[in-house]
């Protein structure tokens, strides 16, 4: 083997890795959101999760890509740790499909059927079809199909080139001695793990092993431990992707590592025991493309059969290895990786916006309660919830802007705009809740008291504000148009109440029943409560916007009066319910 053979081998390896990478990325794009949605939803049962992981990996040809997606889903709360474990196990079996496809390169025979099955016969046709799709078709989906075919043809051509170049190694004594060294199972496992960790693809490293087997110097005694080690090396990608994620996402990556280490240890012990006790002659035979595929599949199936029933135990073990922090995480974060799957990213934004709404509602009700009876616990809860809503607004606002810049459907774009517009209203409601607490604290610190009449009037306005918050938030969560239309007449009643309370306060001032200093606090309270109603009106307007696919909230609010034939009767009903008499 001379320098030109080495260069040819390196060129073939580069083409093989490049083709596998292009094919994998194109398969991911071509599969679209359907496979990812499947990965996110069809995982409630053990076998369903296993089969989902197997199917997704078989299609996108990468267990690493599947596991990275799983880590991202766990980080975003779309999958539980238990569900992720089942998917990861399925991914390990699904990745064996690649080795079977590559084993076509080892087919030998002179019959027409066998000749047609050889990659050298059909890959030129695939490359020709692929280049037509890629260069002359404008549809992005068909372009991806072309890239899949071109990627497959490139990797098979690289595999063939690499196999032809390394055949000269059979006459190199050092190469034979190296693989004799790998018959030591421990060294074989380490070699497989290091190779796969470097190229970050177990499918690619199996393909390289198959190419080297064409020399006839790779025995099953050396190949089997290397295959075992490849499963450990492929965990590097998932471990790297878990950096900076939540505890459960880190646990999902660690489960992937544990699963492969435990499976490798068990199978390695069995392999060494069989080798030592029985010394089967087949271990000294030269490995073939097909034989390596069979060993790769059997190893992964055995590991899965051993550990799939123990998923709950693995979950408990990893929770001990990656324990919870003493303080729970304040707010779940949004994973940037989900931006590659816009519908799931939008679903996650929708979920977190709902959590933000709940937090703002809790802050508001606690703030209203503090006006009637202030306690340190209530004040602290409002401040804590207000900080949480600020954080929600920061992460959701940034994320939704990035999401809106992607190529998403018109419906998704409208919903993203609705969520983005609602964030400020939720955050401002929590700010006003804090204003209510501060007003209550000011009354206490300055030893100011409200008259009985003022307290009664305030209690009526508090009930109206509490109800408009509940009504508008319900309309937002459920997308309920009927509830959204009921918000505007109640908001009008709150505006009217505010004006009445302001006039009544002036009368009490004239009668000496209220002090000037108390009046300043009273004015701040009325302003905060009235503005809460305004923000609730905006939230209801967003719901109307989404229904009519028109993001002009002001026109939506006018429509809430014009298009709602029951506006007048609803207004009268609310006015009677929140009467000051």
Image (cartoon, rainbow, N blue to C red):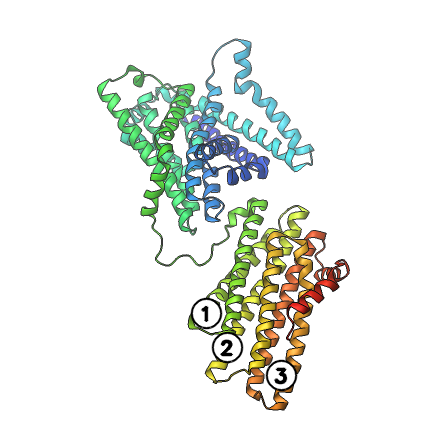
Q: Is mark 2 on a helix, strand or loop?
A: helix
Q: Distance between the residues labelled 2 and 1?
A: 11 Å
Residue in the image at 55% along x and 31% along y: 151
* Percent x, y of residue 494: 65, 70
Residue in the image at 57% along x and 52% along y: 350
Quadrant of the snapshot with the C terminus: bottom right
- Identify the residue position indicated by label 1 in the image: 378
Of the residues tagged 1 and 3, which is closer to the observer? 3
- Identify the residue position indicated by label 2 in the image: 440
Please indicate, yes or no, whether residue 1 appears anywhere in the rendered image.
no
Please indicate, yes or no, whether residue 556 appears anywhere in the rendered image.
yes
- Identify the residue position indicated by label 3 in the image: 505
Which comes before the other along the chain, label 1 or label 3?
1
Of the residues tagged 2 and 3, which is closer to the observer? 3
* Percent x, y of residue 124: 59, 22
* Percent x, y of residue 2: 40, 25
The single residue placed furthest to the front in the displayed view is 581
Report crowding for label 3: few under 14, some 14 to 19, many 20 or more residues within 10 A (C-alpha): many
Report crowding for label 2: few under 14, some 14 to 19, many 20 or more residues within 10 A (C-alpha): many
The single residue placed furthest to the left in the displayed view is 277
Report crowding for label 1: few under 14, some 14 to 19, many 20 or more residues within 10 A (C-alpha): some
């Amino acid at each position: 083997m001379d320098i030109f053979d080495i260069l040819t081998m390196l060129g073939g390896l580069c083409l093989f890795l490049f083709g596998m990478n292009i094919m994998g990325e194109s398969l991911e794009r071509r599969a679209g959101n359907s496979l990812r949605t499947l990965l996110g939803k069809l995982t409630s049962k053990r076998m369903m999760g296993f089969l989902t992981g197997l199917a997704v990996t078989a299609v996108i040809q990468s267990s690493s890509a599947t596991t990275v997606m799983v880590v991202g889903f766990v980080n975003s709360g779309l999958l539980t740790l238990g569900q992720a474990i089942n998917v990861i196990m399925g991914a390990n079996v699904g990745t064996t499909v690649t080795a079977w496809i590559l084993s076509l390169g080892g087919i030998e025979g002179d019959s027409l059927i066998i000749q047609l099955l050889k990659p050298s016969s059909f890959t030129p046709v695939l490359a020709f079809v692929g280049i037509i799709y890629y260069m002359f078709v404008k549809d992005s989906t068909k372009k991806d199909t072309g890239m899949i075919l071109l990627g497959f043809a490139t990797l098979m051509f690289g595999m063939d080139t690499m196999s032809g170049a390394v055949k000269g190694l059979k006459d190199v004594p050092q190469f034979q001695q190296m693989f004799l060294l790998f018959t030591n199972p421990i060294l074989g496992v380490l070699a497989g793990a290091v190779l796969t960790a470097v190229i970050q693809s177990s499918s690619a490293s199996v393909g390289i092993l198959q190419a080297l087997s064409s020399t006839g110097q790779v025995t099953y005694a050396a190949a089997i431990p290397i295959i075992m080690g490849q499963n450990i090396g492929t965990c590097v990608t998932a471990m790297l992707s878990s950096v900076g994620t939540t505890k459960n996402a880190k646990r999902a990556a660690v489960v992937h590592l544990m699963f492969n280490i435990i499976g490798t240890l068990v199978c390695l012990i069995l392999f060494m025991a069989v080798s030592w006790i029985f010394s089967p002659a087949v271990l000294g035979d030269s490995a073939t493309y097909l034989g390596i595929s069979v060993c790769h599949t059997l190893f992964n199936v055995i590991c899965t059969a051993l550990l799939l029933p123990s998923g709950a135990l693995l979950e408990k073990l990893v929770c001990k290895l990656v324990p919870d922090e003493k303080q729970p995480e304040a707010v779940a974060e949004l994973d940037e990786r989900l931006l590659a799957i816009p519908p799931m990213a939008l679903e996650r934004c929708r979920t977190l916006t709902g959590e933000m709404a709940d937090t703002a509602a809790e802050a508001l009700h606690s703030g209203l309660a503090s006006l009637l009876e202030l306690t340190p616990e209530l004040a602290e809860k409002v401040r804590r919830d207000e900080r949480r809503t600020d954080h929600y607004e920061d992460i959701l606002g940034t994320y939704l802007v990035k999401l809106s810049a992607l190529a998403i459907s018109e419906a998704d774009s409208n919903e993203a705009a609705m969520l983005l517009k609602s964030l400020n209203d939720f955050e401002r409601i929590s700010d006003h809740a804090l204003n209510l607490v501060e007003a209550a604290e000011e009354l206490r610190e300055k030893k100011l008291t409200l008259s009985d009449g003022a307290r009664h009037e305030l209690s009526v306005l508090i009930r109206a504000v509490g109800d408009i918050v509940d009504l508008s938030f319900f309309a937002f969560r459920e997308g309920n148009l009927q509830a959204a239309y009921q918000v505007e007449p109640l908001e009008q009643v709150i505006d009217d109440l505010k004006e009445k309370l302001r006039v009544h306060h002036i009368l009490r001032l004239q009668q000496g029943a209220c002090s000037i200093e108390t009046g300043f606090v009273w004015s701040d309270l009325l302003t905060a409560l009235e503005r809460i109603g305004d923000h609730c009106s905006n939230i209801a307007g967003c719901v109307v916007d989404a229904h009519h696919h028109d993001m002009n909230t002001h026109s939506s609010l006018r429509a809430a009066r014009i298009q709602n034939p029951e506006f007048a009767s609803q207004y009268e009903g609310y006015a009677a319910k929140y009467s000051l008499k």
